[in-house]
Image (tube, rainbow, N blue to C red):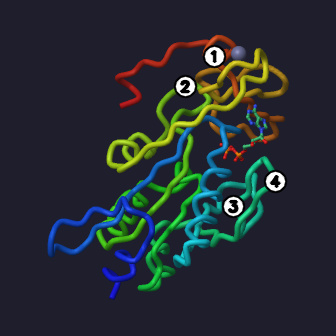
Amino acid sequence: MEEKSVNSSPYKAFSGCGSKPLKGILEVICGPMFSGKSEELIRRLRRAKIAQQKVISFNPHSDTRTALHTIASHNGASLEAITISDPLTIPIHIAHDIEVIGIDEVQFFSPEIINVVFDLVEQGKRVIVTGLNLDFRGVPFGTIPTFMAIADTVTKLSAICIVCGADAYLTQRIVNGTPARYDDAIVKPGAQEAYQARCRSCHIIDKKPVWQKTL
Ligand code: ADP
Ligand code: ZN
């Protein structure tokens, strides 16, 4: 039944081999803030809907920048989503006929999200996840490097550097008007925080990552 629905999909990338059950596909969309990750996720999910596929999407509760039950792009586009905290609740929402699953801001979920997504792909689903590949220091962010490694496709987007207009692959964190320091707490109570897309030349951080410590 499921195999038939996947077979009838216009999306050709599902991997099948003779009579073996078809597996799904994992697509990762990454990049800094404002690079259009949510915009691209919304675009892919809308196209799947046009293709008459059953689509469901999720976003994390901890992403306080967006409204509940909505994947929202800074360009104004939005799509209905189920807002959850615990990634283990995702499978409860996945009916047998769901073909495409979108998960926004995947870096905010606990690492259990990796197994959840892997199992869905094994079951033949097309799963599209978005996330920040680097944190404000320029250090690989949580589970995203693992997702990038196991994905079938990785789309790495750039934003526009707000200082010089070049392509931006980094996110600058500003706390109380000045660039955040490498050792700053990830969440600073009471601080006025802002994030900006910046190129490598315009990104300001006081220390170079100690790579061994990031692994
Ligand atoms: P992300 O999910 O990667 O944070 P969004 O999809 O939310 O990205 O936002 C992308 C949109 O943000 C762009 O289409 C554009 O309208 C807007 N935008 C605002 N600032 C920038 C910037 N510095 N570079 C590129 N796009 C920007
Ligand atoms: Zn720049």
Question: Circle 4: is it few (<14), some (14-19), or many (20+) Cα within 10 Å?
Answer: few
Q: CA distance from mark 3 to mark 4?
A: 10 Å
Amino acid type at circle 3 is Ile
3 and 2 marks in contact (CB < 8 Å)? no
Q: In the rendered image, which quarter is residue 212 located in?
A: top left
Picture disc at residue 66: none
Amino acid type at circle 2 is Gly
Q: Nearer the viewer, mark 3 or mark 2?
A: 3
Picture disc at residue 71: 3
Q: Nearer the viewer, mark 3 or mark 4?
A: 4
Q: Residue at x 31, y 80 (%)?
A: 3
Dot 1 or dot 4, earlier in sequence:
4
Q: Nearer the viewer, mark 3 or mark 1?
A: 3
Q: Circle 4 sits in a helix, a strand or a loop, which is it?
A: loop
How many dots with numbers? 4
Dot 3 or dot 4, earlier in sequence:
3
Q: Quadrant of the N terminus?
A: bottom left
Amino acid type at circle 4 is Gly
Q: Nearer the viewer, residue 190 or 50?
A: 50
Q: Nearer the viewer, residue 170 or 136?
A: 170
Q: Residue at x 37, y 69 (%)?
A: 120
4 and 2 marks in contact (CB < 8 Å)? no
2 and 1 marks in contact (CB < 8 Å)? yes
Residue position marked by numbered label 2 in the rendering: 138
Q: Circle 1 sits in a helix, a strand or a loop, which is it?
A: loop
Q: Nearer the viewer, mark 4 or mark 2?
A: 4
Residue position marked by numbered label 1 in the rendering: 205
| Residue 43 against residue 136 in the figure, above or below | below
Amino acid type at circle 1 is Ile
